[in-house]
Image (spheres, helix red, strand yellow):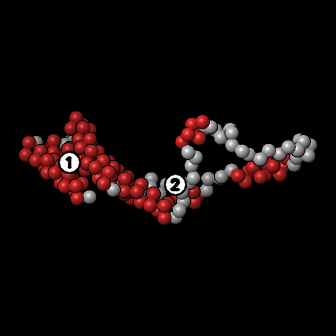
Amino acid sequence: MKKTIKFLAVVESLILLTNIIFFEFYINLQIAALSSFFIIAGSAYAYKKMVKEQIKLENIDEKRDTLDEIEDPYELYENFEVDERLADELDIKAIVKEEKKKIKILNIKDIKKGSRAGVSLFRLVPYLFLVLGFIALRNNELLDIYIYLPSLLVGIVAGYFFAKEL
């Protein structure tokens, strides 16, 4: 974590030095880099937090091994019970009801559980910062898209190093 903070301090120092050259360049670089850094860092932190919660709840799905998935991707060779009775002897309505019970219906609890990381404040606030920063630059006639777009890469690289340290 110390390496990341040092790296971020160096990046911010270099960005601050661009203020000497040209203010428009500096402000575009600063807002773009911070926006993309906050987005990457917030997403990584929210995802890490979600994974830790799932591990704590022991909500871990068992997966088949990779070789088995490659050889039998549709689980055609799995051992399923086959009812050997004649079609006349089978109760089709009971079989249909039993199969319907196996189908998972999308409910509010599952939606809430799956969208926790997606609607986390750690992800929403950085996107809000990105949009408001872009609008502020545009309204004050400081936006230079040729500086702004490449400057997003600076924040992405810094965010990558931050996420790697998490």
Q: Residue at x 83, y 45 (%)?
A: 83
Query: Are the residues at dot 2 and dot 1 in contact (C-beta closer than 8 Å)?
Result: no
Q: Earlier in the sequence, mark 2 or mark 1?
A: 1
Say few, some or many: other residues with alpha carbon within 10 Å of mark 1 (under 14 / 14 to 19 / 20 or more).
Answer: many
10 horizontally vs 61: left or right: left
Residue 8 point in image, percent of width and height:
21, 52
Q: Quadrant of the N terminus?
A: bottom left
Residue 29's image quarter? top left
Residue 49 appears anywhere in the view:
yes
Q: Helix or strand or loop: what does disc 2 sit on?
A: helix
The furthest residue to the bottom: 56
Residue 140 point in image, percent of width and height:
21, 45
124 horizontally vs 85: left or right: left
Say few, some or many: other residues with alpha carbon within 10 Å of mark 2 (under 14 / 14 to 19 / 20 or more).
Answer: few
Question: In this view of the protein, which residue sits in the foreground, 39 or 91?
Answer: 91
Residue 150's image quarter? top left
Q: Residue at x 65, y 53 (%)?
A: 105
> Which circle marks residue 20 in the picture?
none
Q: Which residue is mark 1?
A: 30
Question: In this view of the protein, which residue sits in the foreground, 37 or 3?
Answer: 3
Q: Helix or strand or loop: what does disc 1 sit on?
A: helix
Question: In this view of the protein, which residue sits in the foreground, 93 or 129?
Answer: 93
Report how far apart the C-alphas of labels 2 and 1 lie in the structure: 33 Å
Look at the picture and state if 57 lies above or below 145: below
The furthest residue to the front: 67
Look at the picture and state if 116 lies above or below 95: below
Question: In this view of the protein, which residue sits in the foreground, 94 or 64?
Answer: 64
Q: Which residue is mark 2?
A: 114
Q: Residue at x 57, y 57 (%)?
A: 110
Under mark 2, the amino acid is Gly
Residue 140 appears anywhere in the view:
no
Residue 26's image quarter? top left
